Image (tube, coloured by chain):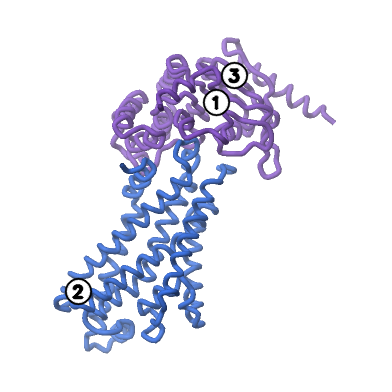
């Protein structure tokens, strides 16, 4: 039996245009972009696009193509999931529906947790759909049947996606505490900028927001040596985000409209 | 169990109450020494100018704000300690109706019913009844986002009343409603008070409307209860402004 709060949050989520647009962008546009980059990189052309693409696509065949999908996704998932989380929590304030969530037998903390469950479930499902969509695109660009490297990189994408989803969770607290999604979107952009700066100064692997992307090859082969501990720092970051958001929702008052 | 609780909550201690309530927000005193009761079966109207403190009072009664001083209670229980079972008998609409724009009218009302603890089959039948009673049947599969202000307000009222609550708190429930909607609202609230013994607190700017609906009218001004009006009496508007002016004069005379 699905609890009422989960049914409620899932219903809003499935009807939201924001979610549909981001699902399409992550699920279809990213693999298509990676396929285009792979085609450009493996062509014999010397156009600027082909030269840049060949610098981005590391490796050949399924390995090169799916690694490119993973690299683009390591940034795109943080953006997409971060935006959806910011919207899911912040919209209750922007649309002034927060007051309707008081005076109920269901606690607001449970409502917040229901939001997390729905977003995380959507994110993981979208990851599987994206990998499945990437396969026919790989076939279409002439990579032949998927090999063992495809399976290995596919698993790496799944891990990167899951960790990045956890890393987006603290944005829910920003959207709640700032009472609107705009501040959380600002924080999301800031996180991406800071990640770039930290990575440029060589501290990437210990910075939770940079580790999954580096592991996926975003910093080149030399920087992809990321330890499991460095990767798993995303778990306490995500857990802290969920906990602090739940606590905020439990104690929040309606001090303004 | 739920049914037993429902009966218990309509007993003698049921209703809405505040005792010497004070609320300050950001250092500003918004409510001062407000003592108010709404008995089961009673419709109590709050009237006052903009900024009088009506919404703050309702928010505090519903646990959305913590009192700075005094106490608030629902069903005779302190609001802060009210159980989930207690909250399942409360219906409210403050300022913005429960009308998520991406959901249909039916989905909104059904969601409100589920969140108030109704099982799926009960929520479905209660939704059909609430949509019908608010005159929304023609719109029930339309998204709330494309409705007029008045119909969104009707959705909010359906969501607030779908679970047959025995404590009802509505802030300006007739806002945006057409004359027919106002009559529907009045009949729904009077039926809830008469047949379910519901304790109902409403706020309004329309004195003639509350005169037709309410059993008691309390005037709130500057965060203070400055008096009451008799619903059946004549020229309520004049009485209202007399109370407000008297309160202002008393304030000015204070050293």
Q: Given the image, what chain letter belongs to the residue carrying mark 2?
A: A
Say if A175 sits above or below A218 in the image: above
Q: Chain of mark 3?
A: B
Give the mark toward the camera: 2 or 1: 2
What is the number of the mark on residue B217? Answer: 3
Distance from disc 2 to disc 1, alpha carbons, whole Å, reads 64 Å
Q: Quadrant of the C terminus of chain B?
A: top right
Q: Which chain is blue?
A: A
Spot occupied by residue A37 in the image (x, y as percentages of width and height): 27, 78
- Mark 2 surroundings within 10 Å by alpha-carbon count, few (fewer than 14), some (14 through 19), many (20 or more): many
State whether residue A218 is above or below residue A46: above
The residue at the point 49 percent across, 72 percent down is A193
Q: Quadrant of residue A160?
A: bottom left
Which residue does the numbered mark 2 point to in the structure image? Answer: A138
| SS under mark 3 | strand
* Residue located at (55% from left, 46% from top): A252
Q: Earlier in the sequence, mark 1 or mark 3?
A: 1
Q: Residue at x 41, y 78 (%)?
A: A227
């Amino acid at each position: 039996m699905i609890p009422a709060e989960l049914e409620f949050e899932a219903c809003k989520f499935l009807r939201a245009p924001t979610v549909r647009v981001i699902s399409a962008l992550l699920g279809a546009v990213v693999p298509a972009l990676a396929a285009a980059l792979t085609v450009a990189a493996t062509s014999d052309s010397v156009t600027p696009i082909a030269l840049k693409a060949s610098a981005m696509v590391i490796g050949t065949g399924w390995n090169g193509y799916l690694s490119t999908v993973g690299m683009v996704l390591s940034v795109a998932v943080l953006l997409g999931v971060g935006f959806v989380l910011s919207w899911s929590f912040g919209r209750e304030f922007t649309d002034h529906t927060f007051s309707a969530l008081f005076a109920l037998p269901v606690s607001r903390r449970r409502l917040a947790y229901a939001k997390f469950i729905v977003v995380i479930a959507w994110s993981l499902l979208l990851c599987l759909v994206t990998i499945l969509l990437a396969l026919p695109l790989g076939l279409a660009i002439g990579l032949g049947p998927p090999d063992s490297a495809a399976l290995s990189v596919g698993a790496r994408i799944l891990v990167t996606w899951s960790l990045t989803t956890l890393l987006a969770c603290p944005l829910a607290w920003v959207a709640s505490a700032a009472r609107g999604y705009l501040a959380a979107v600002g924080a999301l952009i800031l996180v991406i900028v800071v990640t770039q700066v930290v990575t440029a100064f060589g501290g990437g692997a210990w910075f939770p927001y940079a580790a999954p992307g580096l592991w996926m090859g975003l910093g080149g082969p030399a920087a992809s040596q990321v330890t499991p501990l460095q990767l798993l720092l995303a778990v306490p970051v995500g857990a802290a985000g969920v906990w602090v958001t739940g606590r905020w929702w439990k104690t929040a008052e309606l001090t303004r409209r | 169990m739920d049914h037993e609780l429902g009966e218990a909550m309509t007993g003698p201690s049921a209703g809405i109450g505040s005792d010497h309530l004070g609320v300050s927000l950001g250092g500003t005193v918004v409510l001062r020494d407000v003592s108010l009761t709404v008995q089961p079966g009673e419709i109590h109207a709050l009237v006052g100018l903009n900024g009088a403190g009506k919404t703050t009072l309702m928010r505090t009664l519903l646990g959305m704000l913590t009192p700075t001083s005094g106490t608030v209670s629902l069903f005779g229980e302190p609001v802060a300690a009210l159980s989930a079972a207690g909250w399942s008998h409360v219906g409210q609409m403050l300022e913005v109706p429960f009308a998520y724009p991406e959901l249909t009218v039916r989905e909104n009302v059904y969601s409100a019913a589920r969140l108030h603890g109704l099982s799926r089959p009960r929520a479905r039948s209660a939704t059909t009844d609430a949509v019908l009673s608010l005159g929304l049947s023609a719109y029930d599969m339309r998204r709330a986002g494309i409705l007029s202000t008045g119909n969104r307000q009707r959705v909010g009222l359906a969501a607030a009343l779908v679970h047959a609550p025995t404590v009802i708190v509505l802030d300006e429930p007739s806002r945006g409603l057409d004359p027919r909607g106002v009559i529907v609202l009045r009949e729904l609230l009077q039926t809830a008070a008469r047949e379910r013994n519901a304790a109902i607190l409403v706020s309004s700017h329309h004195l003639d409307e509350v005169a037709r609906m309410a059993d008691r009218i309390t005037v709130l001004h500057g965060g203070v209860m400055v008096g009451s009006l008799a619903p059946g009496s004549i020229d309520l508007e004049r009485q209202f402004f007399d109370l407000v002016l008297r309160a202002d004069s008393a304030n000015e005379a204070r050293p």
